[in-house]
Amino acid sequence: MFAARQVFGAAQRRAFSVSAKQSSKVTVLGAAGGIGQPLSLLLKLNPRVSELSLYDIRGGPGVAADISHINTKSTVKGYDPTPSGLKEALTGADIVLIPAGVPRKPGMTRDDLFNTNASIVRDLAKAAAESSPDACILIISNPVNSTVPITAEVFKSMGVYNPKKLFGVTTLDVVRASRFISQLKGTDPANENITVVGGHSGATIVPLLSQSGYELKGNELDEYVRRVQFGGDEVVQAKGGAGSATLSMAMAGARFAESLLKAAQGQTGVIEPTFVDSPLYKESHGVTYFASNVELGPNGVEKIHPVGKITDYEQNLLDVCLGDLKKNIEKGEAFAKQNMK
Ligand SMILES: NC(=O)c1ccc[n+]([C@@H]2O[C@H](COP(=O)([O-])OP(=O)(O)OC[C@H]3O[C@@H](n4cnc5c(N)ncnc54)[C@H](O)[C@@H]3O)[C@@H](O)[C@H]2O)c1
Ligand SMILES: O=C(O)C[C@H](O)C(=O)O
């Protein structure tokens, strides 16, 4: 690969550096957790990251010391769990990933995490709104359908909300949908990219298999859809009380961050499904956030793609999704409004 210096003249280099930011500070809040550690590792391996900033209420500096020995160029710093540590971790960040919060145990829904995680996300969102108001904020903490609206309400209350820069990370649903179809069809999962829309829990997860030209029927289709919708439960059960998906989630979070960095660094046509402030079902159903394919650009959301042509079966799934999603979103918004500190 040629360096910009070799390929561009001075004027072009200046234009390039204005439109495409090449250095990137990425902050992980919850960096010492089950997701946080492998996610931080993958970010350290990403040459698009120049500064990695790791914060947790326990163990951030230890994880940072460990990861900092890896021989890639980026600098790594861990921060103490103090208000000033959090502020420093966030200041100047381009991307903030938030996997802080508790995971499920068998028998729990994601919504059962609401009581604990809502206030964790609210407090971290407040810190981000104060110290990194221009960063892209990537919410991993569950229930995503509610924690994203909570974050939006915090940013709105502080007058710094930018709907183009707030993302619920739903990439794991696409990763699963792609992996599971490849197992049924004997294809290479790396070449599969099944569109998944809606939200991130149970019936709000809607895989649109027909858009990839696949036609499963009857029980096989029902079982496929159910596996994508409840793939998280499969992992929660298998871990038997020790948490939920961490390694596959780290991969999915790192993939989403990589896509944002590519777009920020000038690549066009970068598309990822993600849960964002979306016009698609706002007027018709009062659903203010929705996951669909989103084109990413240097300022975050560039273009929200509509759901497109779907089958009657998929439309039925979508109808159920929209009803559940509305309740999850309203629950998050109500919490934020009643519990703004
Ligand atoms: N979006 C998704 O697809 C997806 C996938 C998997 C898990 N999750 C969610 O991600 C969250 C984290 O899962 P995990 O397995 O990593 O849990 P974990 O318990 O292993 O790690 C969570 C980390 O967050 C830290 N933390 C708690 N409160 C904090 C605060 N106020 N500030 C900073 N750090 C704080 C903890 O110390 C811990 O290290 C859960 O809510 C889980 O449900 C989401
Ligand atoms: O299932 C969970 O609770 C974690 C996560 O949302 C997942 O989809 O794996």
Image: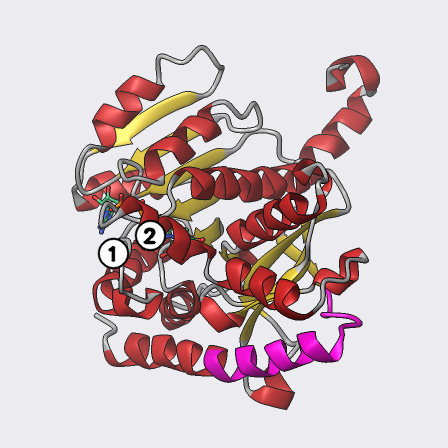
* Mark 1 vs 2: CB contact within 8 A: yes
**In which quadrant of the rendered image does the C terminus lie?**
bottom left
Establish whether ligand 2 lies closer than 8 Å to the Cβ of label 2.
yes
Residue at x 41% of width, y 27% of height? 41
> Which mark, residue 236?
2
Q: Does the magenta stretch include residue 125?
A: no
> Which mark, residue 144?
none
Q: Does the magenta stretch include residue 317?
A: yes
Relative to residue 99, is residue 219 depicted above or below? below
- Residue situated in front as seen by the camera: 290 or 232: 232
User: Rounded to the nearest whole Å, what is the CA distance between mark 1 and mark 2?
Assistant: 6 Å
What is the crowding at mark 1: few (fewer than 14 residues within 10 Å), some, or many (at least 20)?
A: some
**In which quadrant of the rendered image does the N terminus lie?**
top right
* Percent of width and height locating residue 251: 49, 37
Ligand 2 occupies quarter:
bottom left
Segment colored magenta: 305-324
**Residue under pointer 1:** 105
